[in-house]
Amino acid sequence: MTTLDDVEALIFDVFGTVVDWRGSVSRQLSQRHELPDHILEDTATDWDAFTLEWRQGYYKHTRSVAEGGSGSTNIDIAHRQLLDAMLETPRWRHLSSHWDDKKREELARFWHNLDGWPDATEGLYALKRHFIIGTLSNGSARLLIDMAKHADLPWDIIFSGDIIGSYKPNPKMYLGAAEKLDLPPTKVAMVASHIHDLRAAASHGIKTIYIRRSTEDTEFRDSIKPKADGGEVDLAVDSFVEIAKRFNR
């Protein structure tokens, strides 16, 4: 028997846990940037580095708002603001004049079209038969809806930064999701590829499932262990399908 036997709902971090944000955005940039060839030849633009820097700005923004700072809880607005700021920096200024307002809006919406990890759709459909499944993401509601349609992610419910009114790791995100599900935190499990997210969830009584992803927690993901093996999470897996097999009710 595991400590997860009473769980009725699974809430999922999305970026990195369910979808490959890094590969998806850098791929879209490389295919649909619409820049003159001489710009690319002169600068050897590194779209992976561009994506990573954009994402680092996202982390700083969401953390600041979660801690009480000012800023939008609509991540589309934040993504556009972060993009504009990047294009004013020396590293990326050469791109600025080639991307007008319309193009920048299109680029910001690349985050709506992220591909799921290979196990995501199959695993979520399997889990949906036995649990309520939903997002608990800093993404905005419309972004998560579009992403679900794009990647075939069969959520029962979406909890997002703009719906709950903050960002993780603010306690209201975790406790708000449990409250809306009409469940005590102990009957909810968080699934994430980021140990800091799971630590925050666990501090409020939510159970924890760690999933190893190639782009996330790269420095220490292989050292994360379940409590049964002396670790700190309730379960550690390599795929959503594995979770479903563990709880084949």
Image (cartoon, rainbow, N blue to C red):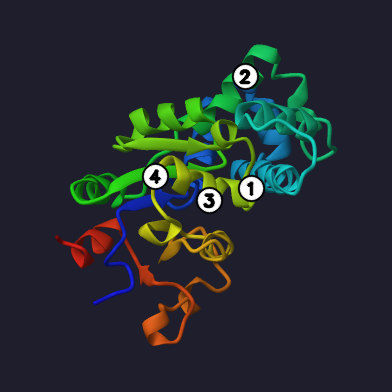
Residue 177 on image: x %, y % = 47, 44
Residue 174's disc is 3
- Mark 4, residue position: 182
Label 4 crowding class (10 Å Cα cut-off): few <14, some 14-19, many 20+?
Answer: few
SS class, disc 1:
helix
Label 2 crowding class (10 Å Cα cut-off): few <14, some 14-19, many 20+?
Answer: some
Residue depicted at x 26% and y 50%: 131
SS class, disc 4:
loop
Residue 105's disc is 2
In terms of sequence position, does the residue under pointer 3 or pointer 1 come before the other?
A: 1
Can you tell which of label 4 and label 2 is closer to the viewer?
4
Residue 135 on image: x %, y % = 43, 43
Q: Is residue 5 visible?
A: yes
Can you tell which of label 3 and label 2 is closer to the viewer?
3
Q: Say which quadrant the C terminus sits in.
A: bottom left
Label 1 crowding class (10 Å Cα cut-off): few <14, some 14-19, many 20+?
Answer: some
- Mark 1, residue position: 52
In terms of sequence position, does the residue under pointer 3 or pointer 2 come before the other?
A: 2
Residue 26 higher or lower than 209, as above or below: above
CA–CA distance between discs 4 and 3?
Answer: 13 Å
Total marks in image: 4
